[in-house]
Image (cartoon, coloured by chain):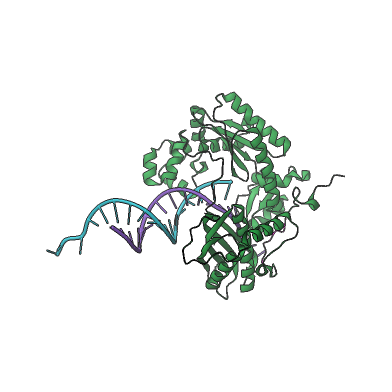
Chain colours: A green, B purple, C cyan
Amino acid sequence: MRPIFALVDCNNFYASCEKLFRPDLKDTAVIVLSNNDGCVVARSKEAKALGIKMGIPVFKIQTQIRRYGIRIFSSNYALYADISHRVMTTLEEMAPRVEIYSIDEAFLDLTGIQSSTILVEFGQRVRETISQWIGITVCVGMAPTKTLAKLANHAAKQYSATKGVVDLTSRERQRKLLALTPVEDVWGVGRRLSKQLQCMGIHSALELADTPAKAIRQQFSVVLERTVRELNGESCIEFEQVPPTKKQIVCSRSFGSEVTTYQQISAALCEYVSRAGEKLRKERRQARVLTVFIQTSPYKENKPHYSGSLSGELSLPSDDTRDLIELSIRLLKRIWKEGHGYVKAGVMLSDFYDIGTFQSGLFDQPARYSNSQSLMATLDRINHRGLGRVFFARQSASRDWAMKRDYLSPAYTTHWDHLIKVR
DNA sequence: TCTGGGGTCCTAGGACCC
DNA sequence: TCTGGGGTCCTAGGACCC
């Protein structure tokens, strides 16, 4: 049977979350900044209308912010994750199969629904329910492939006459919309590819769809070939209800200000390693390879840029933060260079195994800690419950490297002290 | 002054094997 | 003088996504 995908996507998600508990900001332009208050990562529709570009460093738009009274927020992931969870559980109540694709998007499997009227009615119902229950506006696009569903969603956002729902199951409607869509708006076509395609005279999504898939494969790769097939209604990207297991875990962050001492950077690094360890245990996996990296700013023209990174292997895969910290410090010592002002550091875990499945060699050392599983589980439980944080000694140096979050909103839905008060 | 973080997949090229 | 062919594995780098 021909599949039908629906893509549900929250409008201006982070900005909408910030407005949710602030009715006074209803018609105000709102932007949300990346970690460290660096770049613009979300804009309300009013901010978009003012021409604020996605990804622009905030210091470059200070004049507009002042002139138009744009309200700024630091990223508040506790809030966004909780609102996202509400949206996703609502979708799971409404549709048989849901693939959570990102914090603000999900694919629904609607295969089997033949009638366009029923599809559109369903889309409207999703929209109304989420708006009523959670207060977030979503758009819905429906089509026989994921790439076309993305396109349908895009159209639902762009054209108000659609009332936020577009059914793109008919071939004629597909071709009509493809002709109106610039090639760079196609899912899977980024800046580089769209430039190359334009050089070849391919400007619209329809022109890409009408290029023979074989030729695209020869000149580019199977990835773009799949996109071409998907644009023509041939589903190549499958529905994934269960998220695939992770292959790597990264924890990295820019510092609030330049870091120059080894003590600071090692404390920051241990903090990131601890977070990475938590994520690893949540996945119920153990890692054998760990990579550490430290960087100076690439934007400073008068100073030499330094970027050091080094990987190392544990003798046995581990999910014990003590093992991970020890290895990361060994690696850090080898890439640390005195005299630089560092702006970013991070750690990456890879080469994962299920707990206890690694085949160790005859001469390998046995695991170093016998209390590992129970200690880590206890640590995670305490830190998760928010009963006060427990951490390793190396993390405890002063946190003067911590990121900037000057415009943070309250954790309205996840912290008792931040709950909204109604008088 | 001030430029995010966390992922995935694919390809080319080198090392190595028989 | 003549110097193969086919395969795997690994890594770095590039491209994309949100």
The residue furthest bottom is A338
- Corner quadrant of residue A387: bottom right
Query: Residue C12 in the image: x percent, y percent?
Result: 44, 61
- From the image, which quarter does the C terminus of chain A lie in? top right
Q: Is residue A35 above or below residue A216?
A: below
Query: Residue A48 in the image: x percent, y percent?
Result: 64, 45
Query: Residue A234 in the image: x percent, y percent?
Result: 45, 34
- Residue A152 on the magenta segment: no
Query: Residue A299 in the image: x percent, y percent?
Result: 56, 64
Asked if residue A391 shows in the view, the reply is yes
Q: Is residue A371 above or below residue A235?
A: below
The residue furthest right is A423
Q: Residue at x 42, y 35 (%)?
A: A210
Q: Nearer the viewer, residue B14 or A8?
A: B14
Q: Which residues are magenta?
A: A401-407
Q: Is residue B15 left or right of residue A15?
A: left
Q: Is residue A128 above or below residue A387?
A: above
Q: Residue at x 74, y 56 (%)?
A: A386
Q: Main secondary structure of the magenta part?
A: loop
Q: Residue at x 75, y 60 (%)?
A: A388
Q: Is residue A270 left or right of residue A363?
A: right
Q: Nearer the viewer, residue A75 or A349?
A: A349
Q: Nearer the viewer, residue A107 or A295?
A: A107
Q: Is residue A393 left or right of residue C13?
A: right
Asked if residue A303 shows in the view, the reply is no
Count of marks, rendered view: 0
- Residue A404 on the magenta segment: yes
- Corner quadrant of residue A133: top right
